[in-house]
Amino acid sequence: MPEPFKLVFLLVVVNGAPIMARRLLGERLSQPLDGGLRLTDGRRLFGDSKTWRGFVAGMLGGAIAAPLLGYPALTGIAFGLLAMLGDLASSFVKRRLGLAPSSQTLGLDQIPESALPLWFTRESTGLSSDQIWTIVALFILAELFISRVLFILGIRKRPY
């Protein structure tokens, strides 16, 4: 499999792992990362959909998938961690903008969670800036397609 497609696949796995964990575990381990904290604007820091279960699932998904793709497990864990941090950053921005949790914001929903892990692991993966942005674009397309499929299958609550 060509390198860009391996990395798109890894991004899909780490970003899909929280959804699959919710599906498998239901409400177990669904404590929100922000603990219900509200900022001075009266809005939650991240919201209920950002949980410890999902955060850990993203890293575990990376640790499992990376070696299958020829990368060290540590690279997978880093991918998962950085993707989850990117997802938290976009949730933070969406809360400040007054957008509902799990609302679709094309680009804001995908770029931080894909560009962050690609950028910080570029040396170990050998990626150029152009390759990073190509993979981000491929990830956006893949996520939009997969999200619809998961919605049809009843795994996702909302399609994107």
Image (tube, rainbow, N blue to C red):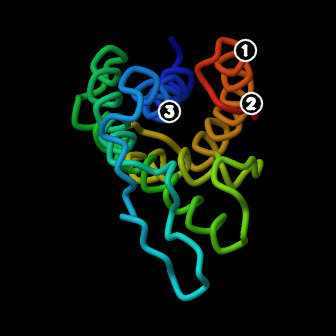
Q: Residue at x 72, y 70 (%)?
A: 98
Q: Which one is earlier in the sequence, the residue at label 3 or at label 2?
A: 3
Residue that sits furthest to the bottom in the current view:
40
Label 1 to label 2, Cα distance in Å? Answer: 8 Å
Query: Residue 48 at x, y = what percent?
Result: 49, 53
The alpha-carbon separation of the residues under discs 3 and 2 comes to 18 Å
Say if mark 1 contacts mark 2, CB within 8 Å: yes
- Residue closest to the eye, 48 or 50: 48
- Quarter of the picture containing the C terminus is top right
Q: Is residue 7 left or right of residue 95?
A: left
Disc 1 designates what residue?
152
Residue at x-position 32% and y-position 14%: 68
Q: Please state which amino acid type lies under the numbered disc 1.
A: Ile
**For numbered disc 1, what is the local secondary structure?**
helix
Would you place residue 150 above or below residue 139 in this image? above
Q: Position of residue 130 (x, y in %)?
A: 64, 45
Residue found at the far front of this picture: 27
What residue is shown at x 64% (from left), y 19% (from top)?
150
Mark 2, residue position: 159
Q: Nearer the viewer, residue 149 or 38?
A: 38
Q: Label 3: which residue? A: 11
Disc on the earlier residue, 1 or 3? 3
Q: Where is 24 relative to 125, above or below?
A: above
* Amino acid type, label 3: Leu
Q: Earlier in the sequence, mark 1 or mark 2?
A: 1
Q: Position of residue 9 (x, y in %)?
A: 51, 23
Which of the 4 quarters of the picture holds residue 71? top left
Q: Residues within 10 Å of mark 2 (few under 14, many from 20)?
A: some
